[in-house]
Image (cartoon, rainbow, N blue to C red):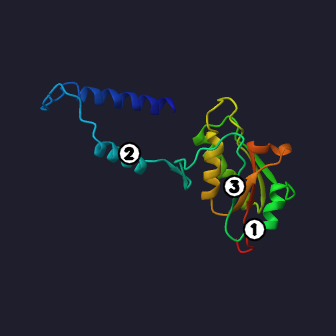
Amino acid sequence: MSDKSRSDYISELQAFREALSDVEPMEQERAHTGQARRNDESASYRREKAQEQNELIVDGLNSTLTREMTAEERVLFALPGVQQKLLKRMQAGHLGWDAGVDLHGYSVDAAREELHGFISDAKRRGLRGLLVVHGKAYTDPGKPALLKSFVTDWLQQIDGVLAFCSAQPQDGGSGALYVLLKRQSDSC
């Protein structure tokens, strides 16, 4: 912010404060019964539905978790029509990967944005095999692997993701995923 725009801002703020200097808060006309508001089921249901409507959706990726996963749980997802032979090769780590992203240490929101950008860039570059490292969440024993759970949900929502599965141990094991993208047509 330049000195001139800063001084303009300060003078406008002072003028605003002076204009409102004689304003006093209105008195409330609500009855104070001394009782806490009733917490019935319909109110909590309405609150929950309102929260769902206000839910954060970034780049088309939903922030609601459908299923929590454990750190060691193996993952396999494929759209209908993906050949079994291709899935087996991917699970064995024989397809290889062209690019990878490491989401360790990211917050859920930052990981969502990073993953979406990474997949979008990979599709634009015509890449097919990807490695997504989400980690195993060993820092909180007994708790679900939240980032892993969110990443598997988001990958199912991203257009162009045909399949994904847990990686081989040398690539991160259950803390990483091989992702197979749809082949891009020449007309793109």
- The residue lying at 65 percent from left, 37 percent from top is 106
Q: Residue 117 appears at what percent x and percent y? A: 66, 51
Q: Which mark is residue 48?
A: 2
Are the residues tagged 3 and 2 within 8 Å (C-beta)?
A: no
Type of the residue with mark 1: Arg
Q: Quadrant of residue 51?
A: top left
Q: Please state which of residues 138 and 151 is positioned toward the viewer in this rendering.
A: 138
Tag shown at residue 183: 1
Considering the image in quadrants, where does the C terminus appear?
bottom right
Closer to us: 170 or 120: 170
Q: Residues within 10 Å of mark 2 (few under 14, many from 20)?
A: few
Report helix, strand or loop for mark 3.
helix
Residue with the mark numbered 3: 119
Q: Residue 65's mark?
A: none
Q: Position of residue 103 (x, y in %)?
A: 70, 41
Q: Give the residue type that dot 3 points to.
A: Ile
Horizontally, is 161 left or right of 178 in the view? left
Q: In terms of secondary structure, where does tag 2 sit?
A: helix
Residue sitting at x 73%, y 72%: 185
Instruction: Identify the amino acid type marked 2.
Output: Glu
